[in-house]
Amino acid sequence: MQVLFDQGTPAPLRQFLSTHQVSTAYERGWSTLKNGELLQAAELAGFAVLVTTDTNLKYQQNLASREISIVVLSTTSWPRIKAHIELIVLAVGAAVRGSYTEVRIP
């Protein structure tokens, strides 16, 4: 499955999603795209999942018509994310077309 990391998603998370093809918005040249533009570009490029730390995304965008699945991490802190990696791996693996999942990381 093709997975895209938004700007705030820690890149080291990639190594724990080794069964997926992971790219970053930066690598794709999309680091300046706003949320709606990024979602559109990701869908057109065939990405199945967007992993982001933008907890306001659901308030800023109409996600009902989106095909891409969105997994939102509640923090950008790599040490906290790393301590709860299994939650993220499960959320990405369980993502289905158009789903929205928030991973709460204490």
Image (tube, grey):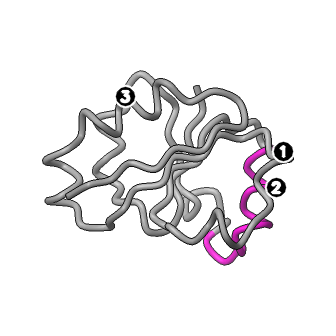
Q: Is residue 6 above or below residue 86?
A: below
Q: CA distance from mark 1 to mark 3?
A: 25 Å
Contact? badges 3 and 2 (CB < 8 Å): no
Contact? badges 1 and 2 (CB < 8 Å): yes
Q: Residue at x 41, y 60 (%)?
A: 9
What residue does disc 3 label? 90
Instruction: Tell me where residue 59 appears, x and y as whole percent.
Output: 67, 70
Contact? badges 1 and 3 (CB < 8 Å): no
Describe residue 104's horizontal placement relative to residue 39 as left or right: left
Q: Secondary structure at mark 3?
A: helix
Instruction: Tell me where residue 31 appears, x and y as whole percent.
Output: 61, 71
> Crowding at label 2, few (<14), some or many (≥20) Cα neighbours within 10 Å?
some
Q: Residue at x 45, y 64 (%)?
A: 53
Viewer-nearest of labels 1 and 3?
A: 3
Q: Secondary structure at mark 1?
A: helix
What residue does disc 2 label? 40
Q: If the image is split into quadrants, where does the C terminus sit? A: bottom left
Q: Nearer the viewer, residue 31 or 71?
A: 71
Amino acid on which the number 2 mark rests in the picture: Gln
Instruction: Tell me where residue 62 appears, x and y as whole percent.
Output: 80, 60
Describe residue 96's horizontal placement relative to residue 86 as left or right: right
Q: Earlier in the sequence, mark 1 or mark 3?
A: 1
What residue does disc 1 label? 44
Q: CA distance from mark 1 to mark 2?
A: 6 Å
Residues shaded magenta: 31-44
Q: If the image is split into quadrants, where does the N terminus sit? A: top right
Q: Secondary structure at mark 2?
A: helix
Q: Nearer the viewer, residue 3 or 29?
A: 3
Answer whether residue 90 is magenta in the image.
Answer: no
